[in-house]
Image (tube, rainbow, N blue to C red):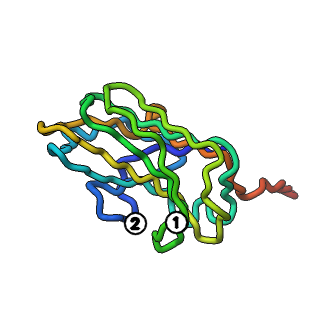
Amino acid sequence: MTTYYSRDITSDLSDGGSFSYSLLKTAGTPNTLTGFPVAKVSTVSADLYTDPNDPSSQGSATGTWTFEINILSGDADVELTPTLHRINSGGTSQASVAAAAQNTVAGVLTFTWNNPALGTFNSGDRIRVALSFRNGTHGNATLDIGFNDADSEFITPYTLLGPKPFAFSVFV
């Protein structure tokens, strides 16, 4: 299992949404995106990306994927639908699966995908979590969204390979 944190650090990729932030393996100092606007009768998008070549060919869609977003100040009239994408190194979606929408009431919203149909991960592939905020009412809404902490996690079923520890001997 690999845990990422939604960080308010701009990603190297963008799909043209309101923000393009990073999914990183370390948390940071908690921060809030205050007054995120979702105009009446509109849909606003935003994106979260893993780093380049992460998970690459080491990823697996088998298992449970979990995305948590911390809505510090919400609006019950706004629905959030996150979509999980396997993208190539250039950001083009190779496969995607949406989660069920939830109203953005204050609190930590949790979304899950069980064995999503993302296909085979290839060298250079990464993950994009696309966020779609839909306001179907006739009033404007603003949200306060928390980042950088354990209330804004993205948990994947795969374990990334890393460098192996080496033993060193010092001869005197």
Q: Where is residue 87 in the image (x, y as percent from the top left)?
A: 52, 65
State the residue position of label 2: 13
Give the residue type that dot 2 points to: Leu
Q: In this view, does 16 lie above or below 76?
A: below
Q: How many marks?
A: 2
Q: Which percent across, then down, holds residue 30?
A: 37, 35
Say which residue label 1 marks. 87
- Is there CB contact under 8 Å for labels 1 and 2? yes
Q: Which mark is residue 23?
A: none
Dot 1 falls on a residue whose secondary structure is strand
Nearer the viewer's eye, disc 1 or disc 2? 1
> Which quadrant would residue 63 be assigned to in this image?
top right
Q: Residue at x 23, y 41 (%)?
A: 135
Secondary structure found at label 2: loop
- Quadrant of the frame with the N terminus: top right
Q: Which residue type does callout 1 highlight?
A: Ile
Q: Which of 133 and 54 is in front in this view?
A: 133
Whether residue 101 sits left or right of residue 122 in the image: it is left
Frontmost residue, 60 versus 78: 78
Distance Cα–Cα, label 1 vs label 2: 11 Å
